[in-house]
Amino acid sequence: MKTKQMFVGLGVVAALGAAVVPMTSYAVTDSDSKAVNVQLSVGSTITMALDSSSVSAAVLTSESSEDKTTVATVTSNSASGYTLSAETSSSNGALIGEDPDNTIAYVGANYGSASEGWALSVDDTFKAISGKKISLATSDNVADNEDTTVTYHFKTAATTTPDVYTTTLTYTAAVK
């Protein structure tokens, strides 16, 4: 009987001993860390408004000239600034008559000496054309409702064929 009590006693001691054994090797992790990269990309924005959607001038076929204006207003958050340009619908900037054989050339800086032609200027500086594109203005800073007044100059000669001459200018403001 003493042997049985001894085994029961050893069993209790063994059970208690197992309960007292440190559980560190069996411990569950109570925290974990992971890194997340956070990135916010803020793009440049630009808006442009024109004060009118058409420009119309009328001149006689005798030697005449007429000037009209459009104001382009640009707002941009780009610290590097923006460019403002216009592109003509004709391949060389010419005004095309309803009869497509009739044209009036874009003469740019030669407007003063030309007997016939049309041109754009900004701040009294005539603008050159490159292909179909005319560079009008540039800014190196953020713009808040910055106005650019574009003047259209039209000149006819006594030999200019009567017609209605047109082109479409598409204005573009772009961040640099």
Image (cartoon, helix red, strand yellow):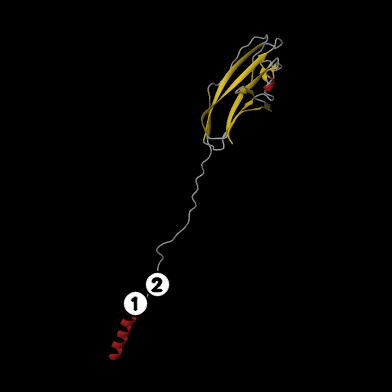
Where does the C terminus fall, quadrant-wise? top right
Type of amino acid at the residue the image marks with label 1 = Val
Dot 2, how many residues are within 10 Å of its Cα: few (below 14), some (14-19), or many (20+)? few
Disc 2, disc 1: CB below 8 Å?
no
Q: In this view of the protein, which residue sits in the foreground, 113 or 46?
A: 113
The residue wearing badge 1 is 20
Q: Is residue 4 left or right of residue 67?
A: left
Label 2: element kind: helix
Which residue is label 2 attached to?
A: 24
**Which residue: 30% across, 85% down?**
9
Foreground residue among 167 and 43: 43
Residue 106: x and y in percent read: 68, 21
What amino acid is labelled 2 in the image? Thr
Q: Using the image as rendered, state which of residue 27 and residue 170 is in the foreground.
A: 170
Q: Quadrant of residue 168?
A: top right
Where residue 29 sits: x, y (%)?
41, 65
Residue 127: x and y in percent read 65, 25
Question: Tag 1: Cα neighbours inside 10 Å, few (<14), some, or many (≥20)?
Answer: few
Gap in angstroms between the C-alphas marked 2 and 1:
12 Å
